[in-house]
Image (cartoon, grey):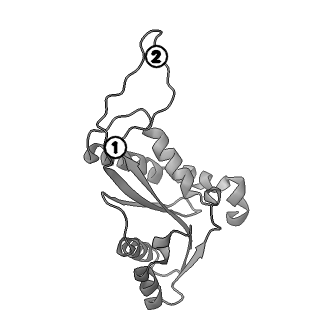
Amino acid sequence: MILYVDESACYLLPLLANTWAPCGQTPVLVEQAGRAHLSLIAAIAPNGRIYVAGQDQAFTGEDIVWFLEKLCGRYRKRNILIIWDGAAIHRSEPVKQFLRKRPGRIHLERLPAYSPELNPVELVWGQMKGSLKNRVFTNLEELTAAILEQVKHLEEDPDLVKAFFNKKEIAFMTN
């Protein structure tokens, strides 16, 4: 099974985009500035499956191992090829120990440096964050609810997730 994996974050600070408003009525977003955020990790498969997890703090090596264990649980009878970027957390000692315990069960491939266009999970983040534009969340619970709504939408629409693999930079690898 091939899975592409990536991490991202969503902050309470609103994502702003151009919008329309009646002439003379400039839209105003009232927000609570802050650095509170949700760290997210997702894995997607060419068959349209998506797996997302999140937490209110930065990911550690142990958190990455937890996510990899969950993926192994979903694919108990299949070996897994994880394709992800070269983030330092992916090369952490907990991840190395995890791999040593499961020789051949899970294989990691690193994307070339500075090449997010090769990871279709980047399109998941674009889709998700696009739905959050011009919305204000006053706390992490509201932000979490909005993200879960988007995750549910993606889980219920595997054809949309499959479409992320049609991007010309990666389509040749998954067709």
**Counting residues from the N terminus, which is met first, the one under dot 1 or under dot 2?**
1
Of the residues tagged 1 and 2, which is closer to the observer? Answer: 1
Please give the residue where the numbered disc 2 appears in the rendered image: 21
Give me the C-alpha separation between circle 1 and circle 2.
Answer: 23 Å
On the image, the x and y values in percent for residue 4 come to 55, 65
On the image, the x and y values in percent for residue 58 come to 36, 62
On the image, the x and y values in percent for residue 133 come to 44, 36
Q: From this view, report whether residue 77 is shown above or below residue 155.
A: below
The residue lying at 49 percent from left, 77 percent from top is: 91
Q: From this view, report whether residue 106 is shown above or below residue 47.
A: below
Amino acid identity at mark 2: Ala
Please give left or right for residue 97 compared with residue 162 in the image: left
* Element assignment for label 2: loop
The residue lying at 44 percent from left, 72 percent from top is: 71
Please give the residue where the numbered disc 1 appears in the rendered image: 12
Q: Nearer the viewer, residue 70 or 132?
A: 132
Amino acid identity at mark 1: Leu
Quarter of the image with the C terminus is bottom right
